[in-house]
Amino acid sequence: MNRRIFGIVALVGMLGAAEGFAQRYGGRASAPEGSELDYGGYRYSKMGSFSLSAEWGANFAINSRNAEGERTTSGSPMYVGGTGSYWITDWALLGMHFNYAFNTKRFMAVVGPTFRTDTWPLSFNMGFKAGLSNDDIDRRTRFAISPSFGIDLLIEEHLMIGFSWAWDLQLDERDRRTPARERASQIRMGLNLGWRF
């Protein structure tokens, strides 16, 4: 009889210790599917290596007048674009981005890294991309850079929505072989909707 009682007490004690160990190092069992259990809580784990996103918003032209003071921008001050990214880790991405701004009539295609905070489901990010820019007015292709900042929210594990800010800057605006340039740069602020595969 004493041995039975001792055995039951020992079994209950072992189960309690195992549960405490799991909670201490493994986290709770209620984590969403595909998430990674981490010390101190959850963090979003690597769901897939690729993602695609669509982007749209407002485009603000800077120095949008030529040397004669003529205004050269027209159309809606908006832009549309898209990004394809390869997720090296949850905090480092390599992406290709393209966009077209209606008021500056400028098309851009840039490539570069983006770094994000390894937090779930809300994350902040910053990136730096470089590539080519083309204007419809003179149809000249120029080298351009595009630093960016943003925030994104993960919904239902794969769906991501966010807000981004970017500064598109052409680097050969002072080329002496061409007249003083308008639309020296543009600032984009918009929303994005993406899916991580």
Image (cartoon, grey):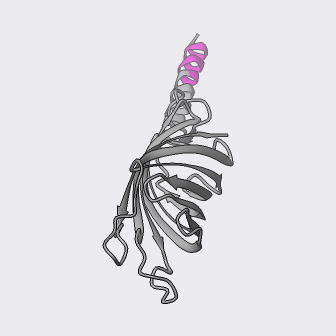
| Closer to us: 61 or 14 | 61
Magenta residues (range): 2-11
Residue 20 rendering spot, x and y as whole percentages: 49, 33
| Magenta region includes residue 139 | no
149 horizontally vs 17: left or right: left
Q: Is residue 193 visible?
A: yes
Residue 106 rendering spot, x and y as whole percentages: 52, 60
Name the residue furthest top.
1
Q: Is residue 27 above or below residue 133?
A: above
Which residue is at a point 36% across and 66% down the rendered structure image?
64
SS majority, magenta:
helix
Q: Is residue 152 visible?
A: no
Which residue is at a point 59% across and 10% down the rendered structure image?
1
| Closer to us: 165 or 179 | 179
Q: Quadrant of residue 140?
A: bottom right
Q: Quadrant of residue 131?
A: bottom right
Which residue is at a point 34% across and 69% down the rendered structure image?
65
Q: State how many labels appear.
A: 0
Q: Is residue 18 above or below residue 141?
A: above
